[in-house]
Image: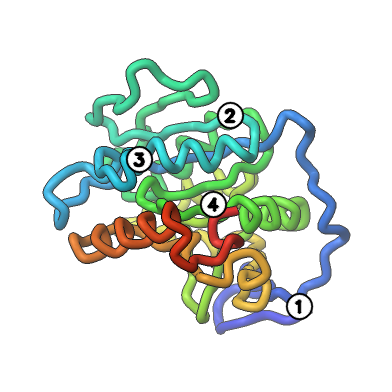
Amino acid sequence: MRYHGSLSPKAFFSSSTPVQSTALWYNSSGMSSIILAGGRGKRLGREKVSLVIGGQSLLERIVARLRKLGGEMILVLAYDQKNPFDPLPPEVRAVHDRYPGKGPLGGIYTGLEESRDPYAATVACDMPFLNTGLLRYMMSLAPEFDAVVLRPGGRIEPLHAVYSKGCLGAIEGILAEEKPRVGRLVEEVRTRFVEDEEIARFDPEGLSWFNINTPQDLERAEALVAREGGGGGLSEHAFS
C-alpha cells in the first residue's frame, strides 16, 4: 500500500491501492447525494444557485444530473438562505447548515447527519457539468474508505467527493479549530484519491469539477452549454 505526502498515513491512498471490488454497494433505490448550496457568489453579484445557463438555473441543472443516480438529494442551505425551490422536487430535501460561518465543512457535516445512507456523493452547487459515470465509479470505491476524493493534476477537489458517516467525528474535531479547512478532512480519515488516469475514463474533458466563481467562469460555462446543445464537439463522455 502506497501513501503520499508527509501527513498521517491513514489519509493517503492512491489509485494503486487495492480495493475488494468495483461492484456498486448501493441498492436499487440509488445513492444519497448532498448539494452544498450556500455559495454566496460575491464575485458574481448574486447567489450561485440562482445563476442561469442554458435556460436552467445551476441548481436545476445539478439536480437533473444527480437524479440519474437515484436516491435522495439533500440540499444544504446557508443558515439564512431562502429555499430556491418552490415547491421542492419530491426527491430533494432541504436543510439548513448547522454550523454557520464554518465554510463547506459545516454543510458536509449537516448533509451527512441528515443522510439515510452510509455514504453520500457530495458536490458544490456551482458545478454544472457533473459526470454521473464518474460519480458512480467513486461510489463503487467507497466501502473500503471514509472518503473518495478527486485529485486531478495532483490537486484535491474536496467538494467533488464521496463521504461516509464515519467522517462525522473527524469533521466535528476540525470544526472546533479556529480556521477549519475542508482540505483537512482528507488528512484525518481513510481517503482514496481518484487520479487522472481513472478520471479520463469517464470525463476526458475534465469538466465534472469545473465550478463557477467569476464572470469569466460563467461565460465559459455558457459557451460549453451552447456546444453541448449544438453538438459542437464536446465528448459524449463529459456529460454522462
Q: Which residue corresponds to mark 2?
A: 72
Mark 3 residue type: Ala
Q: Please state which of the two labelled residues, at mark 3 or mark 4, is closer to the viewer.
A: 3
User: Residue at 46% across / 36% down in the picture?
Assistant: 110
Residue 94 visible (yes or no):
yes
Q: Position of residue 135 (x, y in %)?
A: 62, 53
- Whole-angstrom CA distance, mark 1 to mark 2, is 31 Å
Lateral position of residue 197 relative to residue 46, left or right: right
Q: Position of residue 10 (x, y in %)?
A: 67, 68
Measure the C-alpha gap from mark 3 to mark 4.
22 Å
Give how far across and how far down residue 128 sits, in percent: 41, 51
Label 2 neighbour load within 10 Å: few <14, some 14-19, many 20+: many
Mark 4 residue element: helix
Q: Earlier in the sequence, mark 1 or mark 3?
A: 1
The residue tagged with tag 2: helix, strand or loop?
loop
**Residue at point 79%, 78% (across, down):** 1
| Point 21% across, 42% down: residue | 47
* Dot 3 or dot 2, earlier in sequence: 3
Provide the residue designation for mark 4: 170
Cβ–Cβ under 8 Å for marks 4 and 2: no
Nearer to me, 138 or 177:
138
- How many residues crowd mark 4 within 10 Å: few (<14), some (14–19), many (20+)? some
Instruction: Say which residue appears at 63% left-offset and 46% top-offset.
Output: 164
Density class for disc 3 (Cα within 10 Å; few <14, some 14-19, many ≥20) is: many
Q: Is residue 219 above or below residue 18?
A: above
Residue labelled with disc 3:
37
Type of residue at label 4? Ala
Q: Which residue is mark 1?
A: 16
Disc 1 marks which amino acid? Ser
Tell whether 99 sits left or right of 7.
left
